[in-house]
Image (cartoon, grey):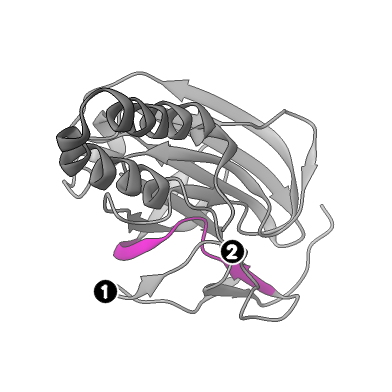
Amino acid sequence: MRFAKDGYATIALAWGAVVAGMVLWVPSLILLLPVAALVLWFFRDPERVPECGPEGWVSPADGEVVEIVPVDHPYTGPATKVGIFMNPLSVHVNRIPRAGTVEYMKYVPGKKWMAFADKASEDNERFYLGFHTDCGPSMVVQIAGFLARRIVSRIRRGCRYDRGQRFGMIKLGSKVDVYLPEGVQLKTSVGQKVFAGKTCIGVCRHERTD
């Protein structure tokens, strides 16, 4: 199984503790082994194949769709925001929903409300990633939560990224919002379980070149 690079140090620490327990005090393995196994599970990074054709948008995160609302952001303009709640057992690696070039990046420090709270998208620590696609401007927002204390985003402004490409993660789960342009037909609903880089959440009605 593949594991996220951002988890290598934590994985090494957890399994190093297991080795130390085997040498120093075997009964400690009752606690150390389950913890080390959970660390492996937490940082797993399975390969994903999109379930939709080239016109489709894939989910940027594993989790459950908890909201679908119309929004109007200075970067995207009128759009549809799809909010995805990631629980602590979800795969935490985030992926690009649609191929595009990064034009907008903004980090906002904030609070640590529970990720499923209505005010989390506006009040919590978050990172905005805006990119130009063939369907129009879109945005992904990584939102920290009560347990999630670190947002990881390996993105560069001006670079182009492919659909389904890994770009970061939120450690210990939280919430990811994706802003779909007006030219995208919604293919998901509240309550649906989605998988990053795999589940189709929208389809371009038409392509744009501006």
Q: For this rendering, which residue is in front, 197 or 5?
A: 5
The residue at 17%/33% (across/down) is 28
The residue at 59%/63% (across/down) is 197
Which comes sooner in the sequence, label 2 or label 1? 1
Q: Which amino acid, mark 1?
A: Gly
Q: Position of residue 144 (x, y in %)?
A: 32, 34
- Residue 60 in the magenta stretch? The answer is yes
- Residue bounds of the magenta highlight: 56-68
Residue assigned mark 1: 191
Q: Residues within 10 Å of mark 2 (few under 14, many from 20)?
A: many
**Left or right, residue 77 beside residue 174:** right
Mark 2–mark 1 distance (CA, rounded to whole Å): 18 Å
**Residue 172 shows in the view:** yes
**Residue 146 shows in the view:** no
Find residue 197 and name its label. Answer: 2
Q: Position of residue 66 (x, y in %)?
A: 26, 62
Q: Position of residue 13 (x, y in %)?
A: 41, 26
The residue at 18%/47% (across/down) is 118
Residue 33, by quadrant, is top left
Q: Main secondary structure of the magenta part?
A: strand
Quarter in which the N terminus is drawn: bottom right
- Residue 197 in the magenta stretch? The answer is no
Circle 1 — which element?
A: loop
Image position of 139 with respect to 191: above or below = above
Total numbered labels: 2
The residue at 40%/34% (across/down) is 15
Residue at the right extreme of this rendering: 209
Q: Residues within 10 Å of mark 1 (few under 14, many from 20)?
A: few
Image position of 96 with respect to 110: above or below = below
